[in-house]
Image: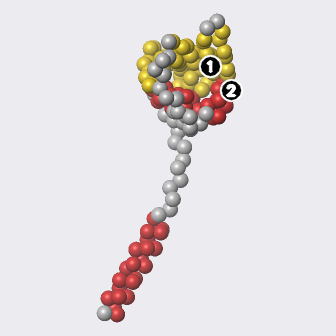
Amino acid sequence: MKTLTKTFAIAALLFVSSVNVFANPIKEEKKALNKAVVENVVDEYINATVKGNTLYISDLFDSNFTQKFNGGKSQKTSGKEDYISFLKKNKGVQYDCEVSYELVEKNSNYSLARVTLDFGNFKRIDYVSINMDKDGWKINEVNSVYQK
């Protein structure tokens, strides 16, 4: 009986120590955004602007990026740093809208996506201009228009 108890005690000790060895916490690392596929860039644009997920915003925009809001007689323009700052301030904020997109134009070095945010009583349509460069697809301009 003593031998059986010792055997179970040793087996339990080995089990606990082996679990501790293999139970190291997994570090969640930022995987690189696959910018070889234009649809991935559009999806991440939607995640950043509509869903508040800012994980890849530094990878999305070209250095010459501009955001233009067209409303009425005026057009408000912001650059890359201002727009990224705005997105970071709104991290985690999700818009209450239905989102859809279509690629209006798609070729080997330029694509134009139409992203529609339907808020029910009005729509915001973002025309997202995307260019291919040495690092993959990058958004270089977004023109936002509003419809009732």
In the figure, is residue 62 to the left or right of 34?
A: right
Say which quadrant the N terminus sits in. bottom left
- SS assignment at label 1: strand
Count of labels shown?
2
Estimate the x, y position of residue 95 in percent, counting from the top left. 52, 29
Q: Which residue is found at the position 32% from the left and 88% from the top?
A: 4
Estimate the x, y position of residue 64 in percent, counting from the top left. 65, 21
Q: Which residue is found at the position 35% from the left and 83% from the top?
A: 8
- SS assignment at label 2: helix
| Crowd rating for badge 1 (residues with CA inside 10 Å; few <14, some 14–19, many 20+) | many
Q: Of all residues shown, which one is farthest toward the front? A: 121
Q: Which residue is mark 2?
A: 82
Q: Which residue is found at the position 48% from the left and 22% from the top?
A: 119
Q: Nearer the viewer, residue 67 or 110?
A: 67
Q: CB of mark 2 within 8 Å of CB of mark 1? A: yes
Residue type at the position of mark 1: Gln
Q: CA distance from mark 2 to mark 1?
A: 9 Å
Position of residue 92 relative to residue 70, above or below, is: below
Q: Nearer the viewer, residue 36 or 18?
A: 18
Estimate the x, y position of residue 94 in percent, counting from the top left. 53, 33
Position of residue 61 relative to residue 112, above or below, is: below
Residue 67: numbered disc = 1
